[in-house]
Amino acid sequence: MTDTPDISPIRTAVSKNLGSRYRAESRFRAAGLAAVAAAVGILILLLSSIVSGGLPAFSANQLHLTVDLDEELVDPSGERSEDSLRRGSYSRILQNAVRTEFPEVTGRRDLRNLFSLYTALNATRLMDEVLEDPTLIGTQYRFTMPLADDLDLYLKGMLVDERSFEPQGTLSLDVSDDGVIVRSSATDFRDLASEVARTLRARATLLEVDADMLAERAEGLSGTEAEDMLYDAELNRRQAAEIRARLETEAGPIALDGSLPSILVESDGRTVLLTDLARNGAGGTGRFLLGSEAVDGESNWSLQVIDTPAERRRVSDQLIVWTRALEARGAISAAFNTYLFANADSREPELAGVKGALYGSILTMIITIIISVPIGVFTALYLEEYAPKNRFTALIEVNINNLAAVPSIVFGLLGLAVFINAFGLPRSAPLVGGLVLSLMTLPTVIIATRAALKAVPQSIREAALAVGASRTQTVFHHVLPLAAPGILTGAIIGLAQAMGETAPLLMIGMVAFIADAPTLGLEGFTEPATVMPVQIFLWSDGAERAFQARTAAAILVLLALMIGFNALAIYLRRRFERRW
Amino acid sequence: MTDTPLNTPADLPIKVTARKVTVSYSGKQALHDVSIDIPDRSVTAFIGPSGCGKSTFLRCLNRMNDTIDGAVVGGSLTIDGQEINDKTIDPVVLRASVGMVFQKPNPFPKSIYDNVAYGPRIHGLALTRPELDEIVENALRKAGLWDEVSDRLTHPGTGLSGGQQQRLVIARAIAVNPEVILMDEPCSALDPIATARIEELIDELRENYCIIIVTHSMQQAARVSQHTAFFHMGHLVEYGSTEDIFTNPRDTRTQDYITGRFG
């Protein structure tokens, strides 16, 4: 066609800018595709980071101990009454049980250290089990409790960097007055000695560089500031010189302190922590952390190096050795973390769970649903189907729309002033939380319902009116059923939003540490409670590292709830949707 | 326009009487002093160009204008001598005796059975299920739809074809046994075959009901109606037997319209 002379002008005009039209279209498509890809990528990143962060919290290392439920300790007055059983020395029982595992531990400080394998709160759990089944008294009972949070993290490999070797060669341990003398024919000690020397040399260099920098900066300054800097520089130099002297001039062993990796020698139920490393690689001296017998020419042994220095980690070498020994004896096993779902909040991460917050959320949402959905739907119905369209109703409509944009914390303030101060309702209660969240959800429900009602074709209303249905019959027989999917979707989106809300609850005292889950019943509405997002907020602030994983796990639980809620919305939508 | 309607058909009893009916929407007058006598058991067609007020007048007859904000209806309207344009008359009662069929088929998104049974149900016309079944069957038979849908009464009414939907809507209207049936351009959304079917139906229904039909198609008015009223710019210009209007119009506007000079 292009070579025919009588081509119409409109065709030439169109074909002239046809290329740029198509280019614009493909640019737009590419931009849209890029936006979708970015959104999906960010979502995947977010989810994978939460899932990988939260997964460790779903398993827990459990400590199984055989406890001797001695009658005298459990039931001090011997009458088997609940009162007497409550006064039993359950922590003594637990302490005795763990002492039987390590009879060689005697010193006060060592014992206290030993008892930190678990949290003392477990004594209450033991008491509860005894109260539930008093026939246990006088028996040897296998009690299961969660391992202390840091040790749990250690076993999950999240706390320290460590490595183990199976050295080729024999090992001898001789007990002397200076400690345990470790000797070996293996080359590993030589490697470790040069490794430690390298670390120390690097440290000295770093100190010297630091000192030089300080001195340089001090040159441009005067007064006390410069003096301080020069003093620090001098201190650094002296430390560096000390380290170098230790390494290069002295012929003796290198002392291993808390700033260096811990080297553990293990053999058949004994563990020695090296305190000095012989420079010639023949071995070193140390002390027993487990066991106490000498060994000669043992070939079955291993070396464990904990690279994270003792002063930079929360668990001591001793606790690590005990934990490993218990694990080797089969007294520690990993299992699904039931505490995460069966318990309410706790100061101890290993016992902390989301049950309290979950129940609080359920109770709060029940109040929110009961209040906001009927009021919202009926308000919208009245405004849309009955109210005359005049200035007054227009004013109401504008105000409702504005209400949806009010920051949620303002509703919290309102709740504090009205529900708690004026009405005298209890603080921290799901009842007040639900009321506040209802206020927040109402505009969303009203707007969604009005939109759904507007979407119902006028012809359906006319059809019903024309056969003689009254206005109310028209609304309830025809309009409302047709609008139901839209109303449900809007209401559920509003409720899901309310479920994830923290700020308004801040003002009414629901952001608090609450160790008991509220009852899932009528009385639960006025008991102190917290909700899922608040629990996440509180845990994210927790000092213990184990709370990090629990925060992510709680987020996962909340996300699961949200997905459940949205799935319900989609199901209901499908269920009620009718075509016209 | 005089107070007394033109060419009142003498051979048939008068069903609907309008005197000086005016309608305004939010102060804008849409209908000026319409006076007309509409006979029973016949088809009366309202014709005229778009926006001439014919649908507005039709909607006065079952007070559908009440549902529009700002609509004000004046004048006197009677059915069987009873005033209907009065706030004391309940539109629900009125609409039960004045059925209406709309331009676009608007069955409820329910089953065919429920569509027809809705009116009798809300008015309590049937006490037992067999009674209701009978009413539904009769209505569907009268609307000429029974043979097509008797085996699928539980299927949704919205699943029928356009012409069937419109007949379903007619069945829904006659199920409550009205005296007057208003039809607002009932065939404008239908193809010629479905239109012919509806027109046949209108002709059959004429024996029992007073039918008032608004139509854009002058051929249709000529085919189905016995009386025709021509509306123009909110005025009733001419009213008489269909034959007279089409063969011997007295007003030049009527003549211009039916000969296709405007509209």
Image: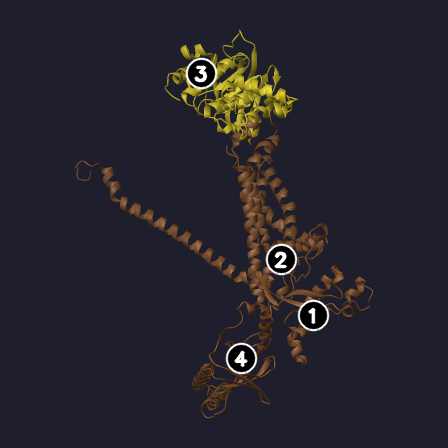
Chain colours: A brown, B yellow
Helix, strand or loop at mark 4: strand
Where residue A70 appears, as percent x and y from the top left, is: 75, 69
Q: Which of marks 2 and 4 is in front?
A: 4
Q: Name the residue under label 3.
A: B221
Q: Name the residue under label 1.
A: A94
Chain letter for the residue marked with disc 2 in the picture: A
Q: How far apart are marks 2 and 1 (CA)?
A: 24 Å
Q: Nearer the viewer, mark 2 or mark 3?
A: 2
In percent of the image, x 30 and y 48: which residue is there?
A: A23
Write down the quadrant of residue A136 in the picture: bottom right
Q: Mark 4 points at which residue?
A: A265
Q: How far apart are marks 2 and 3 (CA)?
A: 76 Å
Q: Could you say which disc has been placed on residue B233 in the image?
A: none
Chain letter for the residue marked with disc 3 in the picture: B
What amino acid is found at the position of numbered circle 3 in the picture? Ala
Q: Is residue A44 above or below residue A255?
A: above
Q: How far apart are marks 2 and 4 (CA)?
A: 40 Å
Instruction: Give the crowd class for mark 3: few <14, some 14-19, many >=20 residues within 10 Å.
Output: many
- Residue situated in front as seen by the camera: A34 or A168: A168
In percent of the image, x 50 and y 82: which residue is there?
A: A170
Asked if labels 1 and 3 share a chain, the reply is: no
> Is residue B230 visible to the viewer in this orientation of the structure?
no
Quadrant containing the N terminus of chain A in the rendered view? top left
- Residue situated in front as seen by the camera: B117 or A148: A148
